[in-house]
Every structure is written in structure tokens, then in C-alpha cells.
Image (cartoon, rainbow, N blue to C red):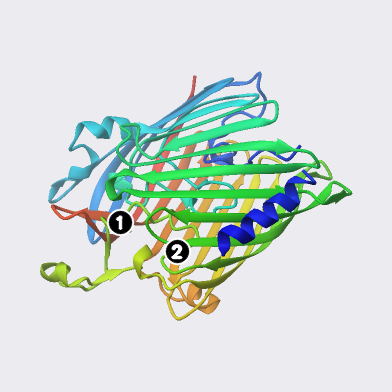
Amino acid sequence: MYRLLFLGLLIARISLADCMAQSGFGGMNQLSEKLVEQRWQTHRQLDVMGGVSLIGAQWRGLVSLNLETANYPFALRLRGSVRQGPLGRYAPDWDEAYDFLRLIQFARIQADNRYARIGPIRDMRHGIGHVVNHFSSSASWDARTIGAELAWATGIFEFSGFTADVLFNNLVGARASLDLPYTSELGINYANHHPTNLTAWSIDLQSELFETGRIAFAPYVSYAWYTRYGDGLAFGADVRSLGFLDILSFRIRVGAFYNSRHFIPGYIGTLFSVNNSQNRIIRSGADLQSIASGDFAGLLLQEARGVTDLLTEFELQIRDTFWIAYSWRRHYGTQRLSELYFRLFMKAGAYFNLEVGVDRLGEHTFADVFTAFSEQSALIFATVLRIRGSIFLRTEARYTFEPIDPVPHYLVQRRFEPTLGIRVNF
């Protein structure tokens, strides 16, 4: 039934048929990775930092180096850390050859209609996020994978793709989109997770019905399916502006999802790398000797019962100094499948940055997001504050996950790391 309904809607919209290209693909528009304000500027900076690290219940000393360089169209950030405590060195800092790749925070080239980036994947989304929605390859920070993103546009055609690991043994995804008349865009999305043999497809169509005062109204429809599981239909509308008053951009979205059994909207999301049919999050307090009993957090696709979801989203950016994004998907069913996504970034000059990211999965009602973090939560809090001259304070806190060997499962890990640094521009 979903397939017939979608095809009917698609035929109706194509008859109307220059749509906005897909915006915000992966790290393309991340303000935290914009090192210069103008193309003609260059940037070379070295931060030397030292402080303390609290991971779990263990305090350690911390030394960290941060190197940044930018010369249009190229930008790079490298960061490496060493932690030492009473019980010895923190092994995950340097215990495998892949840790050399983990020095890369990002390396990117972006010019006109071409974009390429290497680094941990963050906030990856395809289309409206029907399948791939805010995916991150760093949910387990010490086990994060270094991925690659690529986007290219020409004329009315645009292609984008990513891999969660440059070794191509993890998640890969691609999107092809076509601009149609009447500011419409038709997109086809594909994703495959090699370790679990999960394959997903989605097709979406969005059209700006009208625009007034540089504010546009753009409804959309999307159909998605997993090849061995269920399918779902989504529709809704955006109210958006890419240059309101020439200082800010915003988007407001309201939408609905209709899901069959064995389908979860945005299943390939923030915690997918630690919570899928192969890797699971162990509930707090669970007996590690009885993992086989299935005491895990989160639901798998085969456990989903379908039903409906309602979505509200808001995103606002003011120049290159402020960005806030919020999304709440309310699941109307007995299972705990509601999700909250929140991001905040602020920048003022060279010595003040604030970055906040909160993800709450496995909730039921909105009131649940004000309770203590559960096993299906993620947090990043990072700030840089000038003390005097080139001396600054950097604080980072993470609610992340640590792998349990030899079984590929994960436990919640809390990290807090305040450091004092000195900055050298060269």
C-alpha cells in the first residue's frame, strides 16, 4: 500500500516539477570547522595543552597538541593526546596503528560545487533523514572510525556519498538528486552496513510551493524501506529561508511518519555504530557474565511494531557565529522510540568557542528528556575561553561508550577533561 501511495504522490508532484541542493551534507556546513572568514585569508595555529582527565572513576594527567591550518580551499585540524595516571598510561590513546588516523579531526577541500572531507563522520543525513539521520562514527570516542565524505554538483544533478571508515568495511551511503522545475528536488538514497548486511533505500521529493519575503514553504514526501525488514512513508513541510535579512538562515519542519512493522525512522542515527544487530549497548548494572541473556538497551529493527511518529524541527544560523538545531520525533506506540536531537555552537573571536551536542534516544514522552541520561544518550560539551594573552582554558566533557572485548558490545563511559593551553600562530 505504501508503494502505491508514494508512486501516486510522486506522479502528481513531477507534473509540477530548480530545487535547493541538499544542504548540510555531513560536515559540509559545520561552523566549528570553518577556520577563516574569507577565502583570501590563511590560518596556521598550534595549541599546546595540559591538564587532567577523568575517565570513569580514574584521574590522569593529560597533554594534548592541536594543529590547525587553512589555505583556501583546504582546511585541516589534527589533535593528539597522551594520558598518564597512577595505574599507568591510558592504553586506548595509542594501542593500534589506526590511532594515527584518529589524529585527524578533519581534512577538507571545499570549492564552489565540489566538497571532500576526511575525519570522524558527524551529523550525516540523507534527504529528510528517513533512514540515515544524524549518523556519527564517534559514538564510542576511543573506537571512533575515520570516514570520508564527497559531494559534487553540476547543472541539475548532484551526487553525495560517504563511508564511515576509510577502510570501507563499515557503513557506506550515497545520494543522487535531480533538480526539477518549480524549485523541486527528487532524491534517491542508499545505505549499506557491511557488518550486519543491512541495506536501505529511500526516495524523497520536496518542492517550494511559494516564496514571499525570502521565506519559502516547501512540502515533502518520502518513502523508505529496508530490504529484509519493513518500510515507511513520511510527509511534512518546511518553512525556511537561506538569507533572511541577509544575516540569518532558518528552517522549521513539521512532519509525520507512518511505519510498518520492522521499520524505525532514522534507524541509522547517532548511536547506530554502537547499537545494531551486531553491536549492543549493555544496560547499566548488568552482569557482564550474563550478556547472552539479552540485557541490552535499545530496540532492533525486527523488534519494532510500527505505528506512527510526529516530527518537529527547528534550525537557526546567524552569520558564522551562532548555530542552533533542535529535533524531536515523538513515537505514538508502547515502545520507547522517541528521539531528541540538539546542537548549539557559538563563536566570538579567536578565543571563545562553545559547542554542545545532546542526543536522547529510547524516550517515550518529552518529559523524559529532563531525566538523568540513560544508556541511549550521547553528550558533547566543549568550550574555549581566553584567560590572558595567548593563554586559554579548554574544557571538554563527553557521554560516550567504551567497547567490551572480545564481544563487540559497549558500556557507557563518562569523560571530563579541563586543560590549560597556550596558542601560537605562525
Instruction: Name the residue tied to disc 1.
Output: 401
Q: Image quadrant of residue 374?
A: bottom left
Residue 305, disc? none
Whether residue 256 is visible here, answered yes or no, is yes
Whether residue 269 is visible here, answered yes or no, is no
Q: Nearer the viewer, residue 132 or 398?
A: 132
Name the residue at 53% across, 60% down.
341
Residue type pointed to by label 2 = Phe
Residue 9 versus residue 93 in the image, above or below: below
* Left or right placement of residue 122 versus residue 5 in this view: left
Q: Position of residue 78 (x, y in %)?
A: 40, 30
Q: Image quadrant of residue 182?
A: top right
Instruction: Name the residue tied to disc 2.
Output: 263
| Mark 2–mark 1 distance (CA, rounded to whole Å) | 25 Å
Name the residue at 55% across, 53% down.
129
Q: Position of residue 151 (x, y in %)?
A: 55, 31
* Left or right placement of residue 65 versus residue 188 in this view: left
- Local secondary structure at mark 1: strand
Q: Quadrant of the N terminus?
A: bottom right
Residue extending furthest bottom? 334
Mark 1 surroundings: few (<14), some (14-19) or many (≥20) residues within 10 A: many
Q: Position of residue 45 (x, y in %)?
A: 48, 26
Residue type pointed to by label 1 = Phe
Q: Position of residue 146 (x, y in %)?
A: 36, 36
